Image (spheres, grey):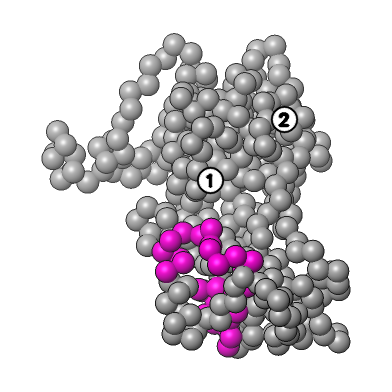
Amino acid sequence: MITTDILIIGAGPTGLFTVFEAGLLKLKCHLIDALPQPGGQCSEIYPKKPIYDIPAYPEILAGDLTDKLMEQCKQFEPGFTLGERAETIEKQEDGSFIVTTNKGTKHKAPVVAIAGGLGSFEPRKPLIDNIADYEDKGVEYMIKEPEMYRGKKVVIAGGGDSALDWSIFLADVASEVTLIHRRNEFRGHLDSVEKLQELKSASKINLITPAEVIGLEGEQELESVVIKQETKVFKKECDHFIPLFGLSPKLGPIADWGLEIEKNAIVVNNALDYQTNIPGIFAIGDVNTYPGKLKLILCGFHEATLMCQAAYQIINPGKRYVLKYTTVSGVDGFDGTRKEAPKAVVKAIE
């Protein structure tokens, strides 16, 4: 049986940052993830997608963010159970929990932090009769390797951040990018909408609204899409059709753990520490919900920090923890490394 201080369900960005924050408190972490590698969606779905709202990084690829987080938490020696799904949870008489995976691996910890992102997920597919015939033959529901679109004609459908971001990114990769949306208004960030309009004006992106793709054509592989725009129907040649309508999230076995669930998300007490209705079980990142919740990676980092403070009190009842700033105290890794705070900074603060 694997034992640890904090058992983290989900090895995405929020789960990985939890390791660092717990390490500052001298707490050990072990992570379970159904995916075969850390990083969550950042590694599995869009490793080459740029992210713009990570502090200190004007732009960073999702895969690179995972690498940086792994480097940051390495000194605290986290354990990993990858390629296995957390299946059941049992509370013990001493208040600890035993979590068993679908492959029978057992983990014991006094604190469980669910950081499973959107949970298990599958892409939302448009209602096109023959779309399955072209899957992996020109139809993709996510972009893992942008280079495969270099010099190709690409049609993207959608009106959210993913559709906007990838349209903008591929404008410098593909020979032609066309974005199709059912409405004239977009749900994405204002900056992205403005950038899209700039690229349209520069003839680097074709924008067709309000419209939708209603059919696909091609002999062996995709050759064109059928577009309906108001009262007219026409075809457009393309090599790839990428409908980006978001993901349909599912909590999976976690939904049967007795947690309070609201709209496929776990309800937490955000006024205190992001604890669920079961003491000792927390939910952080996109998997949780509370009034005013924003599904952003940086919000997950904040939630992980406060959660670790509460976990410390559960693991060390009655023991007072004095918050130390890493700029003053430095960082002591479990691996024996020591990162000293710059003396000039310490002196200035003193």
The x, y position of residue 325, in whole percent, is: 29, 35
Residue in the image at 61% along x and 70% along y? 210
User: What is the secondary structure assignment of the residue under circle 2?
Assistant: strand
Left or right placement of residue 76 versus residue 174 in this view: left
Viewer-side residue, 299 vs 42: 299
| Left or right: 204, with 340 as reference point | right
In magenta stretch: residue 185: yes
Question: What's under tag 1, amino acid-wise?
Answer: Lys
Nearer to us of marks 1 and 2 is 1
Residue under the image location 69 percent in, 38 percent down: 264
Location of the C terminus (image quadrant): top left
Question: Where is residue 4 drawn, in percent x and y?
Answer: 60, 30
Residue at 72% across, 84% down: 234
Residue at position x 46%, y 25% from top?
Answer: 271
Residue 297 seen in the current view? yes
Q: Position of residue 348 (x, y in %)?
A: 13, 40
- Res. 63 visible in picture: no
Residue on which disc 2 sits: 99
Residue labelled with disc 1: 295
Residue 139 occupies quadrant: bottom right
Residue 253: percent from left, percent from top: 77, 36
Among numbered discs 1 and 2, the one appearing first in the sequence: 2
Q: Which residues are magenta?
A: 167-194
Q: How many marks?
A: 2
Tell me the element at label 1. Answer: loop
Judge whether residue 274 is colored magenta.
no
